[in-house]
Image (cartoon, helix red, strand yellow):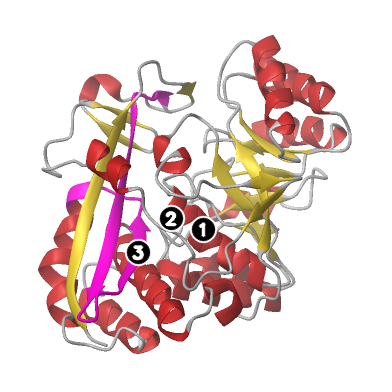
């Protein structure tokens, strides 16, 4: 079996009425699929959550020529080749995300070639993975409480909410959500990188008093010193990593004693191979890992394979904001039962893309992105909201 060609598919969805959060009014969503086609007809699937044009450029203009004709089962060798050729302009950011999409597709192919699911190849022994609902954006507090109850009714036992709207709102929102879901379910709080150290300390005490499971990214990823200063001082665990890339990035966070929970994402930080290395590193430091996922169901399932395979795998994120790349992209939709995501026993990632959905949202020109706020990516000055 040899790699025949690599396909890059950018997807764009525009909300009729999006959500509001610390970054502004979200008008749409973007993601990139990478399909590795082999000469025997087998296809591996991965995804990248980054700038669509940069992902296309890196994969098609540099990585694909290096990989065509190679044996896709040699995942580690090919990861190293991709990394070495892009290191001078990569290591972090869009390049690592694009590289990771190819890597995830290679893992999908490795599993298909030997007839085993990826979670089993990685050492897992059960086809389930704890999952949490990622939603609860800015809205009136009573509506927020109602939404939290609905998420629990859908089968989730953990929910994540976004804060950083203001001290009064943040405190009222956490209090209301805790009351709505009761003491038997967990709350995670995302600070969206909007806090000073003093403000994070003040809010952190309130979160601890309400049994919040973790306080996520109160500071920018570059501000490692503030993470280290806050950790262990307010009674709530610190989590971050969605904006970190590569093993070396997470090694610096762990060396600094900055986090309790690391959040690598296969669609961001370098693929299944790199999240695997981060998971082992975290375990050696006595830390849990809980992958970030905000882009698509391919990324959810890739990250879930790793959580299911590692003893320090905590949970995986499942977007619940009406994103069709989560809800509709797969022929067999994601299934959450009693707080756990069901994994397939089928080979590879155990997924099949819904081709009708892929064609419906396909972005033909990755440079022709309508102005808007696509959650983490902003195009057009009028959609920029500074911290």
Query: In the figure, is residue 149 to the left or right of 372?
Result: right
Q: How crowded is mark 2: few (under 14 residues within 10 Å), some or many (20 or more)?
A: many
Q: Does the magenta stretch include residue 99?
A: no
Q: Residues within 10 Å of mark 1 (few under 14, many from 20)?
A: many
Mark 3: secondary structure:
strand
Query: In the figure, is residue 64 to the left or right of 293?
Result: left
User: At 41% across and 68% down in the image, what residue appears?
Assistant: 271
Residue beneath disc 1: 301
Give whichever of discs 3 and 1 has the lower sequence position: 3
Figure quadrant of residue 106: bottom left
How far across and how far down the image is residue 61, in percent? 10, 67
How far across and how far down the image is residue 340, in percent? 70, 51
Q: Is residue 35 magenta?
A: yes
Residue beneath disc 3: 45
Q: Check contact, mark 3 vs mark 2: CB within 8 A.
A: yes
Residue beneath disc 2: 298
Figure quadrant of residue 279: bottom right
């Amino acid at each position: 079996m040899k790699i025949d060609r690599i396909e890059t598919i950018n997807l764009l969805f525009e909300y009729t009425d999006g959500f509001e959060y610390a970054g502004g009014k979200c008008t749409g969503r973007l993601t990139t699929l990478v399909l590795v086609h082999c000469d025997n007809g087998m296809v591996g699937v991965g995804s990248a959550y980054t700038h669509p044009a940069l992902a296309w450029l890196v994969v098609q203009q540099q990585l694909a020529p290096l990989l065509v004709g190679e044996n896709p089962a040699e995942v580690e060798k090919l990861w190293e080749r991709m990394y070495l050729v892009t290191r001078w302009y990569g290591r972090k950011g869009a390049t690592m995300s694009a590289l990771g999409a190819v890597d995830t597709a290679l893992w999908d192919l490795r599993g298909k070639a030997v007839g085993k699911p990826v979670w089993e190849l990685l050492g897992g022994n059960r086809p389930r993975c704890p999952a949490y609902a990622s939603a609860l954006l800015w809205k009136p507090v009573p509506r927020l409480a109602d939404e939290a109850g609905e998420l629990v009714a859908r089968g989730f036992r953990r929910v994540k909410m976004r804060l950083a709207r203001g001290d009064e709102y943040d405190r009222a929102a956490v209090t209301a959500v805790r009351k709505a879901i009761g003491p038997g379910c967990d709350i995670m709080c995302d600070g969206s990188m909007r806090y000073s150290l003093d403000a994070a300390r003040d809010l952190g005490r309130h979160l601890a008093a309400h049994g919040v499971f973790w306080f996520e990214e109160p500071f920018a990823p570059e501000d490692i010193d503030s993470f280290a200063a806050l950790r262990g001082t307010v009674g709530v665990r610190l989590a971050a990593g969605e904006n970190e890339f590569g093993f070396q990035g997470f090694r610096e966070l762990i060396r600094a004693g900055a986090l309790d929970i690391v959040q690598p994402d296969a669609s961001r930080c370098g693929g299944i191979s790199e999240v695997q290395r981060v998971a082992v590193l975290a375990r050696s430091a006595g830390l849990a890992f809980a992958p970030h996922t905000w882009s698509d169901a391919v990324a959810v399932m890739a990250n879930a394979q790793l959580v299911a395979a590692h003893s320090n795998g905590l949970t995986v994120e499942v977007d619940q904001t009406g994103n069709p790349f989560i809800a509709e992209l797969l022929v067999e939709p994601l299934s959450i039962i009693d707080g756990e995501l069901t994994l397939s026993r089928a080979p590879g990632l155990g997924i099949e893309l819904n081709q009708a959905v892929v064609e419906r949202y396909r972005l033909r020109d990755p440079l022709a992105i309508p102005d808007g706020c696509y959650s983490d990516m902003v195009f057009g000055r009028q959609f920029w909201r500074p911290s």
